[in-house]
Image: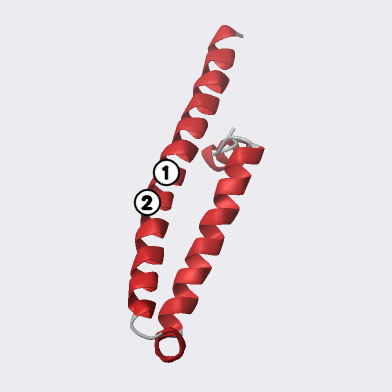
Amino acid sequence: MPLWLDLLRTPMAAPETPRLKTMRRTFQVLCILCALTVAFVSPLTAIIGRFAPIGIAALLISTAVYTAFYVVRKNRADQAWLDAATSQETAS
């Protein structure tokens, strides 16, 4: 079988658990919020005042920390799933 066909048939990630799906959606919302707050920093500063940059910084830091947690958890799930798939192939 050609390599490209074998790669197409091979799943590259673990099936998403409800917890990982929630984490992915939260990550996406945090990224969108970061983009919006950075894009609208001037109006936010006019409305909130000097606390706007502090809030934006807190959002950016929390997004970075949450991203690290998500990536670690997702990689752990993918690796466990690939290990299980590999051990089933060698047992067959």
The answer to whether residue 19 is seen in the rendering is yes
Q: Which residue is mark 1?
A: 69
The vertical placement of 68 against 37, above or below, is above
Nearest the eye: 10 or 26: 26
Q: CB of mark 2 within 8 Å of CB of mark 1?
A: yes
Image position, residue 25 (x, y; %) = 59, 54
Nearest the eye: 35 or 5: 35
Query: Mark 2 belongs to which amino acid?
Result: Val
- How many other residues sit within 10 Å of disc 2, few (<14), some (14-19) or many (≥20)? few
Image position, residue 10 (x, y; %) = 59, 35
Image position, residue 32 (x, y; %) = 52, 69
> Residue at horizontal 34%, vertical 69%?
57
- How many other residues sit within 10 Å of disc 1, few (<14), some (14-19) or many (≥20)? few
- Which colour assignment does the render follow? secondary structure
> Residue at horizontal 37%, vertical 56%?
64
Q: How far apart are the two marked residues, 2 and 1, measured between alpha carbons?
A: 6 Å
Q: Quadrant of residue 54?
A: bottom left
Image position, residue 37 (x, y; %) = 45, 77
> Residue at horizontal 60%, vertical 37%?
11
The answer to whether residue 15 is left or right of residue 44 is right
Give the residue at the far right of this rendering.
18
Say the numbered circle drawn on residue 65.
2
